[in-house]
Amino acid sequence: MEKYDIIIIGAGPGGLTAAIYAGRQGTKNLMIDRDLAGGIGREVPEMENYPGFDNISGLELIEKMKAQATKNTELHEMEAVTEIVKTDDEYRFTVKTNKAEYQSKTIILATGSSHRHLDAKGEDEFLGKGVSYCATCDGFFFQDRNIIMVGGGNSALQEALYLNNLGAHVTLIHRKDEFRAQKHLQNQIKEARINTIMNATVEEIKGSMLVESVTLKDTKTGELSDLSVDGVFISVGYVPHTELAEQLGVELDESGHIIIDKDQKTNVDYVYAIGDVCVGLKQWIVACGEGAVAATSAFHDIS
């Protein structure tokens, strides 16, 4: 069974940064991801707030980070961690995957999150038939089509702008009377003259073979109305992946996120957590900073 100083579970921006720092410290490291490196970060169409780049796609930045990280760290993509077992020897953790088993002195949880669903009637039924959580994946198919983007945060507005630039006819749907996205994104929405419907939720997604319409509910009056659309794009937040953390007895807060201290340590010795799975601001630059801190903390703790 292969043994490591640090095993990083998850190869998003935080995990990749942790790998860069861990590798440069001369430790033996393994990074495992159940999908391709980058996770949902690969779906980000455009970023204008990552230092050093005026504008870069998530996929492009991930590929740059991956190339840098794998200079000194082993990466296993498309390998799912199924269980982590604590042991009593120097290599405190046995990491079991769908392909092999490994031992490690420390664990960095960078397990990320997945798209939150609306739980609207028809949402699951029409997934891939007009319902999408990824504008960069599916936007091309909706050029010159009527679509809605559901959400009010940065991601929702960024993807609405991206879809609009592709030539889709976009309407933004938000359940409140104000967007929570950054002001400059709100200004871009106004400049692009993207239609918005505020104080509304999607109650049902309807169609025959493909999406044909949605039923909206006015959050103030309760009134229902139908809107003809060809596609429904959804960006209403994320659900943290904490299954492995719970196996280890890691403490979570009331929202289901991992609680960490200033050194990215959890309540379980030699277990650290970073990125979207943790309490805190959900931004790439934050996850990267946390990855650097966690790798450095792990290195100091085993030295």
Image: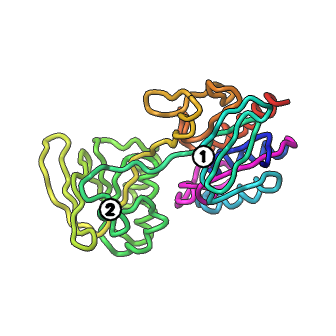
Q: Nearer the viewer, residue 290 or 239?
A: 239
Give the x, y percent position of residue 59: 61, 61
Give the x, y percent position of residue 284: 60, 46
Q: Is residue 234 above or below residue 102?
A: below
Q: Any mark on residue 284, and which?
A: 1
Q: Which residue corresponds to the image point at 57% horizontal and 53% vertical from the top-left?
A: 48
According to the image, label 2 marks what residue? 232
**Magenta part, dominant SS:** loop
Q: Quadrant of residue 39?
A: bottom right
Asked if residue 112 shows in the view, the reply is yes
Q: What residue range appears in magenta?
A: 25-53
User: What amino acid type should be assigned to the residue bearing mark 1?
Assistant: Trp
Give the x, y percent position of residue 105: 76, 35
Q: Residue 41 in magenta?
A: yes
Q: Which residue corresponds to the image point at 40% horizontal and 52% vertical from the top-left?
A: 235
Rate crowding at label 2 as few (under 14), some (14 to 19) or many (20 or more) other CA atoms within 10 Å.
Answer: many
